[in-house]
Image (tube, rainbow, N blue to C red):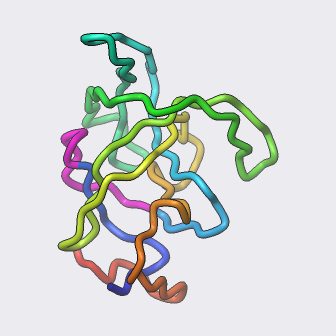
Amino acid sequence: MEIGWREWVALPDLNVERIKAKIDTGAKTSALHAYNIQTVERDGTAFAQFVLHPAQRRKSPAVKCLAPIVDKRVIRSSNGVAAERIVISTALRMGDRSWITEISLTNRDEMGFRLLIGRDAIRKGVVILPGRSFLLGK
């Protein structure tokens, strides 16, 4: 599968049908814009409860999400600031392929993309064409 440096993807477990993502092989971990992040426990399992805005530069729609927490990690952002982030496990769909991946939660309001897909989320058989965009369509 060939993808561009930015693509429309879906996060079906989070009820997000479409979110514009930047593919960033320089980032190890993927990052999703989230706010009002809380940790809740359900049947002995820790979950992250949060809200996200899937549309760039818009406050609506606001999607309430719940996802299992797999870790808390110190992650260094592109500006060099390290902070502890909650990491969730969720399904990611690109084109006609879907897989489970880990995504850290952070406020990306000031960033150009609400979702950054790092190299750990890219699967075998995926070729990134850095000069192209939206090869998988909408």
Would residue 7 be found to the left or right of residue 98 on screen?
right
Image point (49%, 76%), residue name: 5
Above or below for 120 versus 132: above
Residue 138 seen in render: no
- Region in magenta: 12-21
Would residue 131 be found to the left or right of residue 28 on screen?
left
Residue 15 belongs to magenta span? yes
Q: In terms of depth relative to the viewer, which is nearer, 91 or 79?
A: 91
Q: In terms of depth relative to the viewer, which is nearer, 69 or 54?
A: 69
Image point (46%, 26%), residue name: 35
Q: Position of residue 101 (x, y in %)?
A: 39, 52
- Image quadrant in which you'd find residue 44: top left
Q: In terms of depth relative to the viewer, which is nearer, 136 or 97?
A: 97
Would residue 47 be found to the left or right of residue 29 on screen?
left
Residue 17 belongs to magenta span? yes
Quadrant where the image shows the N terminus: bottom left
Above or below for 60 versus 55: above
Q: In terms of depth relative to the viewer, which is nearer, 24 or 41?
A: 41
Image point (32%, 53%), residue name: 100
Q: Position of residue 9 (x, y in %)?
A: 30, 62
Q: Position of residue 82 (x, y in %)?
A: 77, 37
Label the magenta part by its dominant secondary structure: strand
- Image quadrant in which you'd find residue 62: top left
